[in-house]
Image (cartoon, rainbow, N blue to C red):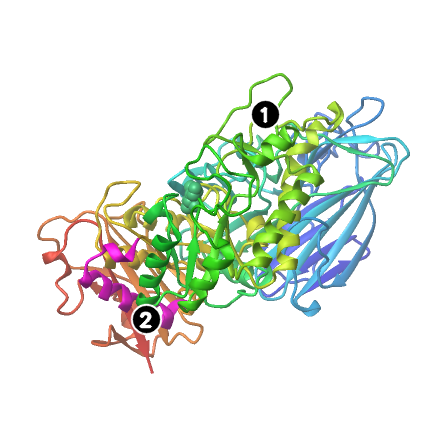
Amino acid sequence: MGIKFHEKEKQFHLYNSKISYCIGVCPDGEVGQLYFGKRINENQTVTYRQTRGIRPVCCNRQEDENYTKELSLLEYPAFGNGDFRNPAYEIRQKNGSRVTNLVYRSHEIYSGKKPIPGLPAAYTNSDDEAMTLEIECFDEIADIEVTLFYTIFENYPILCRHARIKNAGSEEITLTRALSCCIDLPDNEYNWIQFEGAWGRERYPAERSLSNGITSIESMRGHSSANYNPFVVIKRPNTDENAGDAFGLNFVYSGNFITQADADTYGKLRILMGINPRWFEWGLKSGEVFDTPEVIISYTSDGLNSLSQGIHHFMNNNLIRSAYKNKPRPILLNNWEATEMDFTEEKILKIAKKGKEAGVELFVLDDGWFGKRNDDYAGLGDWFVNTEKLPQGVKGLSEKINDLGLKFGIWIEPEMVNEDSDLFRAHPEWVLGAPDRPRTLGRHQMVLDFSKKEVVDNIYSQLYEVFSNASISYVKWDMNRSITECYSQGENASVQGTIYHKYILGVYDLYERLKKAFPDILFESCASGGSRFDAGIMYYAPQAWCSDDTDGHERVKIQYGTSYGYPVSTVGAHVSASPNLQTGRSMSITDRANIACFGTFGYELDLNEISDEEFETVKEQIVFMKEYRSLFQYGDLYRLSSPFEKNLAAWMVVSEDKKTAIAAVYKNLKSPNEGQQRIRLKGLKDDLVYSINGKENVYGDLLMNGGLSIPSGDDLWYMGDTDFTSRLYVLKAE
Ligand code: GLA
């Protein structure tokens, strides 16, 4: 790994064993893109790029009338100076001009990586893991300085980028656009994969080819959303799971975002990612700076599976911060689908006791324990116990749960308030809402104005009381509606364009303060299931409830799609009751667990209500999960067959030493008299002999090239089973 500066040519080459990222100062002083892809020799300088046109519309250098920004590949392009594509940033100056032009001034190269104040960001565990290049650019007319940050990591084909914009002048300026990165590529023969959906069907991959014009996804919901995840893949058309070039962009941010790919009519491609500029206006007084959130940019020349693996290991090692970092996650039992808000202490203890008998480690009390929370019309904002349900408080219940030999966890939704709450009665000015307009409700609740420090302070104090007075090991932090009428009451018109971003900064601030005060608590993020499943939130909460849809069949698709951009360790996944609450579909307890095990694993049902036989199965599942959860959560994941393409979906995890692996196969619909199928496994060692579920012994090379037979051995799976069935195959080598 290194960052080489070619002084004469003013070129920078960031490289590690897998990737090269080359940028340089263009003849007109702007920083331009030279090469991004597979590692090339760092001693060369790059000469191929096109910045001169035969008949350019504009000329950006008097001394060379063929030189034009329109054809340049740029690192942080401006608006109004001859580059007609979308810019990375835009600044409204006092005189009304929005024209700027950045030129290189200086740079700094150092080991390690600096944090971004107030924002989540990847980090290094030691300085020798990464190197950072900071390039300072300036515009002397607008009096702004922009610092571009690039960090390259030794062990991952990954580069992190963000920008810092400073008002170096004396007059206030307004940022109306401040994206995090621009990647200009010299050709546009690429496909784009986005991860889309809605509540209950989050992060389905959808691929299309980029033809001339802009392809774009965004969120204006105030959170990253289930509709479009802030993760995209740009790949060569023929790239598949096993081979070919691909780039991944993970936005380390949980609010409104935009991601675009602009395939222009000169055959180039511009990729942009950042905070959504819609209703973003950020004033910068003299000397003030604005930091954009970070983008994690990954690259592979070895196909999508390898791209995902790089992201998985990077997130586990360099993004997630928790006492549970790289540790097996506790097997939990959550009462939500068992009781919803209708519970007593006695009922909860009965459920928890059965969980303990089954072997679970953590009991989580979900929604309904606080204020007047008996339905979703009341209580949010009042984070004190409802003593009618829990007469001895959260403290009393948590101690009783601890006495059973279980850890205790609790649900909160700190960003929300119900009209029927003491908090709203005392502070109606603390909710977001446009003047003289009704507020749009979502689940009968309003959004607290987290752009106001006093609101975050109040919620912090309330939660501090709860967490410090009871024995709490885990917190599920929910967020059940999007932001509408985003307006901060009592604030000037001029700051209203900052509120969406300040809101998220408030969320991050609350997380940061609670994490500092309670470093051992395991946070799980949730937003009506998977509506805030992003790299930003992972910095605070190392796992996130993947979806409210716990139907095993649906979960195969949701978790498969999620795996492109996020590691298994982040995927909150539970076994719930059958028939399923969301789909009405029935599945055996084994099939439900066979998908939940590719996640943090737990149960979300009343184990008292299942049959004795099922309960025995649950006990076995927990023993199995305790043995293999580190492999599931931290092993190398290989996607083998897609549920979006095939009736038989499959994937597997392989241990670092390749001696243990678990493959899972999920059948969608059964058809009669099916033939035998083979799934070619991956990631094994050619010359190791693997036992399959303790029976057959087969060489790795045969399993990878010939395949695993489905059904396998004497397991005549297809004979007895119905639709939506599955199998796990544990492979072990000496
Ligand atoms: C959301 C969550 C659920 C549950 C409920 C409680 O819908 O996604 O898991 O916590 O809220 O109200």
Residue 205: name its quadrant.
Answer: top left
Image coordinates of residue 161 in percent, x first then y, are 66, 50
Mark 2 surroundings within 10 Å by alpha-carbon count, few (fewer than 14), some (14 through 19), many (20 or more): some
Left/right of residue 183 with respect to residue 699 in the rendered view: right
* Residue in front for this viewpoint, 53 or 616: 616
Q: In this view of the protein, can residue 543 be seen by the observer?
A: no
**39 above or below 257?**
below
Whether 109 is drawn above or below 72: the answer is below
Which amino acid is tagged 2? Answer: Val
Residue at position x 10%, y 57% in the image:
720
Quadrant of the rendered image containing residue 140:
top right
Q: Secondary structure at mark 2?
A: helix
Q: Residue 592, image x and y in percent? A: 28, 55
In the picture as drawn, the residue positioned furthest to the bottom comes out as 734
Q: Is residue 609 magenta?
A: yes
Residue nearest the viewer, comparing 523 with 290: 523
* Front position in the image: 358 or 542: 358
Q: Position of residue 326 (x, y in %)?
A: 51, 67
Q: Along the horizontal axis of the image, is 465 left or right of 525?
A: right
- Pointer 1 local density, CA inside 10 Å: few below 14, some 14–19, many at least 20: some
User: Which x, y percent locates residue 328?
Assistant: 46, 67
Split into quadrants, the picture shows ligand 1 in the one at top left
Residue pointed to by mark 2: 623
> Which region of the structure is painted magenta?
606-629
- Residue of label 1: 485
Q: CA distance from mark 2 to mark 1?
A: 49 Å
Three-letter amino acid code of the residue under disc 1: Glu
Q: Main secondary structure of the magenta part?
A: helix
